Image: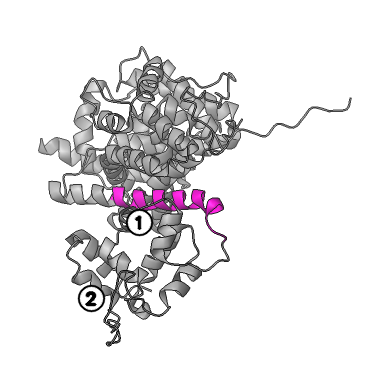
Amino acid sequence: MSDDRQVETPPTADQIIETYLLRREEALRHVPADTPEAARAARAVLSEFMRLYPHTAAALEDFAATESLVKNSLEVEAGTESEKSGEEEAIVRRGMETAARLLAARRAPHAPEASAPVAGLKKEVEAHGLTIQALASATRLSVPLLVKLDRRLIRFASIPRQAIERIGAELGRSFEAVAAYLQGDPQFASQASFRADAAPRMPSQQDFFEAVETDLTMDEAQKAEWRSFKNAP
Amino acid sequence: MRPPPRLPGAETDRSIRPLTRRAHDTGALYERLPEVEAQLGHALALEETELMKALRHDYKSGAHIKDEALCYLIRERLWGSLHEQANAFAEILLRRHAGTIRRRVERAGVEEQHREDCGGEINIRLLTELFDTDSDRSDFAQVRFGLYFEKLSYAVINNFRRLQRRERQGESVVFTQGDDAKEFDRLDTLADERALSAEERVLMREALSLLPEDLREIYTLRYFDGWQIEAASTSEPSISRYLGVTSRTIRNRLREAEAILKRWREGK
């Protein structure tokens, strides 16, 4: 007899674990928590799913073992409240960097053609319907520093790679395109006016990290973060 | 099944999109809790500033908007290309769970130098799935956010712990079998009948903190969860298979753990 059944794609470990969690929740609904009975009931559901879905047995074991370790461990009382708060803030900050990158990737299909050079950081920001403040927040730079970068008043060689990456991710532009822009000649402020009989003087370019240290709008945490990139590859 | 695409510039339809992911065993579509549906109906009718204010209510408040609803609101803003609002909602979600991530990573025994990376990776997975509006892989977050977040965070934590275990696997445990060990082995064979009672669990959790992380894990799986050291059947969870070490190694480590705990009991 020929087998003309369609071959089904096996479910992913994620799908199986989700279903396992729902069935376990049902099984434990009327069982007192944290008792041998609850452990037996949970183990029974785990075994059933390992039997039904052998290709995800290892993933189910992994999940159950890690869950057990976390739930049965007491919190280690190391660190002050301030240190814990600092760690949590760092977790949020890294999450927001991820959010910025993901949103930039979503905007990329609607962004100016990838091959077109960057016309200016402020112009790119406006083209994306953002504000310079939003770019500052997403990249952990400051508005004054972004303005200096936009006007190319920061010496390119001193700009850490991470700054260029973050700006590029937020604007949906490549590292190379942003770097090419930042290497251009310094610009006057658009509102600059000068006497006809005196040539304007372009301010000399500043070191990126010096600009960070003297930035009055950056808090210490931001400055510390940028300092950490100073000697990084 | 993917949610239907929305045309750019189309007037926003504030009706709630149904979930499209299914429970694999029954084939039934995932469903949001009635409370979540009700919260969404209310939230979608609010002006932006009112909604941001409503999202700030914490768990203790009766006006708290559940994480399940917040996940939908993030995706709803993404569908409408309202990126700044999606970003703001995502920050609220991250702030709600930063403490949970920190505690979970620490309790799981992730080494200190890797904890920030582990926490960062958890956030990457969470946001990548939530922001992927072309797929329904984060639908479960709108059904039971707590369980969804456990699934996601334990998967990341487990990757870090596997790396740590590989680094330690060269270590061997040498244990001289004495009378105490014989007694332990006898008790261990009765472990299934001698599972820790609810009261013993509470007491033992305090003692578990005395154990190094690798011993704690084995002890927890054996005496809290009743896992076998070595299972004949591949559909029974097995400590030796999970850790990739021999049953002899597991027994040696359990003896070592019991020796530490015995000193703790005698000291009490």
Can you say whether A68 is above or below B113 in the image?
Answer: above
At which x and y percent is residue B149?
Answer: 39, 35
Between A6 and B36, which is closer to the camera in this rendering?
B36
At which x and y percent is residue A30?
Answer: 36, 12
Helix, strand or loop under label 2: helix
Can you say whether A86 is above or below A42 in the image?
Answer: below
Please state the extent of the stretch shown in magenta in the rendering: A91-113
Name the residue that disc number 2 marks.
Answer: A210
At which x and y percent is residue A194?
Answer: 27, 79
Residue that sits furthest to the left in the current view: B268
Counting other residues with Cα less than 10 Å from the Cα at mark 1, is it few (<14), some (14-19), or many (20 or more)?
A: many
Helix, strand or loop under label 1: helix
- Taking the magenta stretch, the answer to whether it contains residue A110 is yes
Q: Numbered disc 2: what chain?
A: A
Q: Residue at x 42, y 61 (%)?
A: A123
Q: Residue at x 23, y 75 (%)?
A: A210
Residue that sits furthest to the right in the current view: A1
Q: Amino acid at mark 1?
A: Leu
Task: Decide if residue A84 is on the left or right side of residue B168.
Answer: left
Task: Decide if residue A21 is on the left or right side of residue B91.
Answer: right
Q: Is residue B166 shown to the viewer in this render?
A: no
Between B146 and A144, which is closer to the camera in this rendering?
A144
Q: Image quarter for residue B220?
A: top left
Q: Amino acid at mark 2?
A: Glu
Mark before the other along the chain sequence, 1 or 2: 1
Q: Is residue A186 shown to the viewer in this render?
A: yes
Can you say whether A229 is above or below A102 in the image?
Answer: below
Name the residue that disc number 1 marks.
Answer: A135
Quarter of the rendering occupied by the N terminus of chain B = top right
Q: Residue at x 43, y 78 (%)?
A: A184
Q: Main secondary structure of the magenta part?
A: helix
